[in-house]
Image (cartoon, rainbow, N blue to C red):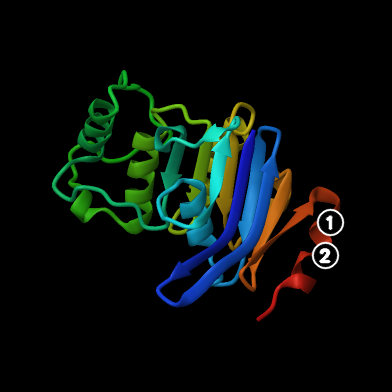
Amino acid sequence: MLRLFIENKYYGKKKVLESIELKIDSKGVYGVIGKNGAGKTTFFKCISSQTTFKGFVHLNQKPIEKDNVGCCPTNPFLYDYLTAEEFKNFFAKLYNLENKKNNIFDLPKDQLIKDFSSGMKKKAYLNALLQKKYAIYLFDEVFNGLDIESVFTFENVIRKLGESSIVFISSHILASLFNMCNSIFLVNDKKVKNFKKDEFDQIESFIKY
């Protein structure tokens, strides 16, 4: 289903990723881990074609289209002077969607986004993003800023999405990834190494600090 080849990816003269081949043939949840600055976010940007690199990314044997990928970055952008519901409605109109009445997270109806905490902003973005169905989802450190109840709620959402889509999630909470993921990709030393479920106990020994 998904084929990614990164011969190399540079930012200026700095090589960030190289010699990466990724093949995913089944729907499910896939973890992405690595120390800060290892290239996890760049890896996500390559998958979603948000950055240029030498190589290719194909979905079902065709070049991937941005509309096939739903992304939640670590710090999502929202409009400060909208309410959460207004932002959700704006997102629906932007993509010609039928606005979904149900939200994953409950948020204040009359409070402006500029007065939200980082966790509330992430909830508002996720409520808007998940109105649309995607073949691939990318969640970059999605649990950052969420309270423990919201983490549990969204873990269940991720599992449900993995039944019909390919879901990538990066997180420093390894226990959550171990419970949810079919396999985990370690971004380390410009490369990506795949660990299957029965190999998860080996991951820490491969991380270079």
Residue at image location 40% in from the left, 28% down from the top: 132
- The spot of residue 84 in percent (x, y) is 25, 39
Considering depth in this image, is 179 or 47 the residue closer to the camera? 47
Residue at image location 33% in from the left, 42% down from the top: 124
- The spot of residue 151 in percent (x, y) is 53, 48
Q: Residue pushed farthest left? A: 81
> How many neighbours does mark 2 have within 10 angstroms: few (below 14), some (14-19), or many (20 or more)?
few
Considering depth in this image, is 61 or 35 the residue closer to the camera? 61
Indicate the amino acid at tag 2.
Gln
Tag 1 secondary structure: helix
- In the picture of the structure, the residue carrying the numbered disc 1 is 199
Residue at image location 60% in from the left, 30% down from the top: 60
Where's the N terminus, which quadrant? Answer: top right
> Residue 74 lies in what quarter of the image?
bottom left
Q: Is residue 57 above or below residue 28?
A: below
Residue at image location 65% in from the left, 81% down from the top: 209
> How many neighbours does mark 1 have within 10 angstroms: few (below 14), some (14-19), or many (20 or more)?
few
- In the picture of the structure, the residue carrying the numbered disc 2 is 202
Indicate the amino acid at tag 1.
Glu
Q: Is residue 99 above or below residue 59?
A: above
* Horizontal arrangement in the rendering, residue 183 relative to residue 133 (left or right): right
Considering depth in this image, is 30 or 194 the residue closer to the camera? 194
> Residue 189 lies in what quarter of the image?
bottom right
Asked if labels 1 and 2 touch by Cβ distance under 8 angstroms, the answer is yes
Residue 67 - label: none
